[in-house]
Amino acid sequence: MLQDVFHDILPFDTILVSTYKQGCAPILIYDNYPPERRQQGVERYIGDAYILDPFYTSTQQSCRPGVYRLSELAPDCFEDSEYYKHYYGALGLKDEIGIFIQLPGDIVMVFSLGLHETSLPLTRKSLLALKNLQPIIEPLAREYWKWQGVSFVDRLEHHEPVEAAFDSFGDGLLTQREQDIVKLLLAGHSTKSAARELAISDGTVKVHRKHIYQRLAVSSQAQMFRLFLDHVSLVSRQSGALSQVGP
């Protein structure tokens, strides 16, 4: 199995194999999470946590196939973000390696190798070995998808309600510019990074941030993150209720 090959190169703790397509929620292909961590590490991720994941975001921005460390794709203050603390911190992950494979139909398969706080540190030799292995894995993944992909395609779902919740957070309270800034802050961008992404000054971001906190009635990033989670949960429940009612 590829899992064993990966482990011989890098003694990882967890593996999560998912496929990503533009405008669709990720599909789980395989994982090795133990039962006691599966809800947090797998079900929560596939359910809604993926929306702030740097690996997911990169697939939506046409990231080139290859091998990446989490830090290469994450915003500058990702490890200080509430998302990192609630998801990665809760799982005890200190690093993650993503092996990105391009499949037909604009689908990207990602092998996510998780390293815990007690894991051996990632070495340049291991990372180079994985990068050399990636071109060999690609045709194998393509062949797998050719014969097995049809069994997963029916599970493709659009982002609703998670993407809708992300886009609608702050509706009626925040301007479009402020909503754009909130998305970047929730994803782990610093003030300077958010300013760079939006081509505005640091000072402008700080002013907007002050207004955002006032209008959302929060006083910290942690409170804003909890409010966002509540919003996602509410939109999900409303969407579920509507789907049960039917047309």
Image (cartoon, grey):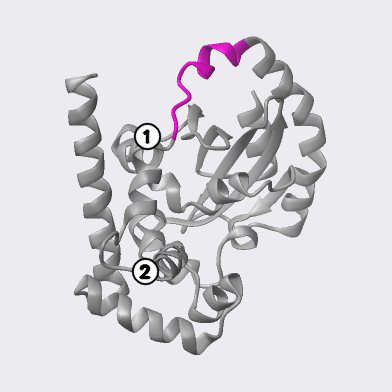
**Farthest residue toward the bottom?**
203
Q: Is residue 100 magenta?
A: no
**Residue occupying image coordinates x 24% and y 19%:** 247
Can you tell which mark lies on residue 34?
1
Q: Which residue is mark 2?
A: 175
Residue stretch rendered in magenta on the structure: 148-158
Up-down: is 59 above or below 71? above
Give the x, y percent position of residue 111: 60, 37
In this rendered view, identify the residue nearer to me: 98 or 160. 160
Task: Report crowding for label 2: few under 14, some 14 to 19, many 20 or more residues within 10 A (C-alpha).
Answer: some
Indicate left or right for 188 with 60 as reference.
Answer: left
Nearer-the-camera pick, 48 or 106: 106
Horizontal and vertical percent position of residue 98: 62, 46
What percent of the width, then of the height, locates residue 201?
Answer: 55, 85
> In the rendered image of this protein, does residue 219 appear above or below residue 149?
below
Q: Which mark is residue 4?
A: none
Q: Residue at x 37, y 79 (%)?
A: 209
The residue at 33%/39% (across/down) is: 161
Q: Nearer the viewer, residue 144 or 204?
A: 204
Which comes sooner in the sequence, label 2 or label 1? 1
Q: Is residue 127 above or below residue 193?
A: above
